[in-house]
Amino acid sequence: MKTTTADLKRIVKGTLGVALMLLTVPLALGQSGDMRHGDGMLHGEGMQQMQGRGDAVRGARGEGEILSLDRAAGKVKLRHGPMPDLDWPPMTMRFHVQDPSMLEGLQEGQTVRFEVHMRPDGSPTITHIE
């Protein structure tokens, strides 16, 4: 059986379609980012596509436990409860903070209340923490 040019084109198109689908499924499911769902499963780093219900949500409030602080980088890792305004289940995430000075006086193990706003690129930023 001889493979024709048309057969090769069909194979390449099919392969590219499957590859594109495999690359976009995690984004569509909102599973890129540094997060650990309630089931303990850790997902990548960046949290770029986790937008919840979309751009209409400007901010949401949550409560969580500080697991680690990176004051130099302006990041905090929190284990937070559900955040219904963003359609987020309980999970562990590393957040950027709007102003690194907000981390002063905070300690690992401390329970905090915080407010998250989505940046235009889709990444969440803590704008208030106490």
Image (cartoon, rainbow, N blue to C red):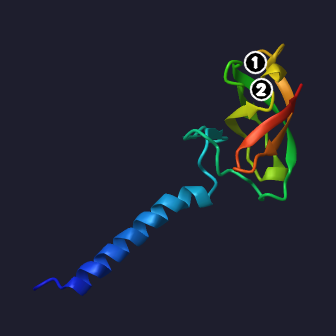
**Residues marked 1 and 2 touching at CB (< 8 Å):** yes
Answer left or right for 70 relative to 57.
Answer: left
Query: At 73% across and 30% down in the image, what residue appears?
Result: 78
Amino acid type of disc 2? Glu
The vertical placement of 20 against 45, above or below, is below
Query: At 85% across and 51% down in the image, what residue appears?
Result: 85
Find numbered disc 1 in the image and state the secondary structure of the residue it sits on: loop
| Quarter residue 115 falls in | top right
Given the current orientation, which residue lies at the most extreme left position? Answer: 1
* Relative image position of residue 100 (x, y in whole percent): 78, 23
Front residue of 127 and 30: 127
Query: At 31% across and 81% down in the image, what residue appears?
Result: 10
* Relative image position of residue 114 (x, y in whole percent): 86, 33
Amino acid type of disc 1? Gly
Q: Which residue is mark 2?
A: 65
- Mark pair 1, 2: CA separation: 6 Å
Answer left or right for 32 relative to 90.
Answer: left
Query: At 11% across and 85% down in the image, what residue appears?
Result: 2
Residue neighbourhood size for the residue with mark 1, other residues' Cα within 10 Å, grouped as few (<14), some (14–19), many (≥20): few
Q: Which residue is mark 1?
A: 109
